[in-house]
Image (cartoon, rainbow, N blue to C red):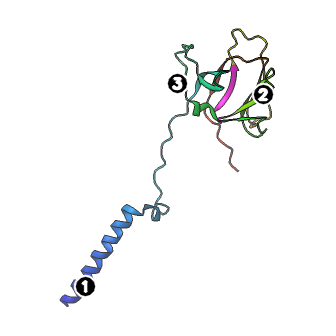
Amino acid sequence: MMTLMRNLLTVIGVLAIIAVGLFFFRGDLYRPIFPSQPKLQPPALSGKIYATLSSSRGALIEDKSVTDPNGLPFDIAEITEGEAEGFPASTSPSLTIINIAKREIRHWKLASNVRRVSLRATQLYDVKVKEHSGPPGAPYQVEIWVPREADLNLTFEIGPVAAASGS
């Protein structure tokens, strides 16, 4: 009887050690079974980001000349997902710069939270801005036609991403 009890406690001890090891090192095995509390998302940013499209550097940089107390800190990841040459796809939000003098087209894929891009023209009166409006839910696209090389002061209005309608 004593041998049976010792063997039973040994088996229970080994199983407990295996269970503890699985709990700490292989959480992916039990997490689908036990739902966890949803993680709280940080509040979506809403406001304006001021940037300058530098003609010499060919990049979007922070516009430090603006002193808007309600302006958001410059974060390139909040406004764009990357740069490319040529025309953008009509299915993605984009900012397109068309330089007439250099015959060059460049575009940036905008982040989904960008609601509007506007030009803060101070001395450039011959720059044309064309916003493409489509049906509700269509991606936001804007073209800026510049006749010559110049820095462009831009305002990016961002807001929360609209929730997709479920089926």
Residue 4 lies, with reference to residue 32, above or below; the image says: below
Crowding near the residue tagged with mark 3, few <14, some 14–19, many ≥20 C-alpha atoms within 10 Å: few
Residues under labels 1 and 3: Cα distance?
66 Å
Residue closer to the observer: 146 or 155: 146
Tell me the residue at 56%/13% (across/down).
65
On screen, residue 21 versus residue 105, left or right, reads left
Asked if marks 3 and 2 touch (Cβ < 8 Å), the reply is: no
- For the point 58% across and 30% down, the residue is 76
Q: Residue 90, how many percent across, how many down?
A: 79, 38
Q: What stretch is highlighted in magenta?
A: 110-118
Q: Name the residue under label 3.
A: 73
Question: Where is residue 28 drawn, in percent x and y?
Answer: 46, 62
Specify the farthest residue to the left. 2
Q: Mark 1 points at which residue?
A: 7
Q: Distance between the residues labelled 1 and 2?
A: 80 Å
Label 2 CA crowd tier, 10 Å (few <14, some 14–19, many 20+): few
Per the model, the C-alpha gap separating discs 3 and 2 is: 30 Å
Of callouts 3 and 2, the N-terminal one = 3
- The one nearer the camera, 159 or 102, is 102
Left or right of 163: which side holds 87? right
Q: Is mark 2 on a helix, strand or loop?
A: strand
Tag of residue 25: none
Within 10 Å of the Cα at label 1, are there few (<14), some (14-19), or many (20+) other Cα atoms? few
Q: Is mark 1 on a helix, strand or loop?
A: helix
**Closer to the camera in the image, 12 or 80:** 80
Can you tell which of label 3 and label 2 is closer to the viewer?
2
Which quadrant holds residue 165? Answer: top right
At mark 3, the secondary structure is loop
Looking at the rendered structure, the kind of residue marked 3 is Pro
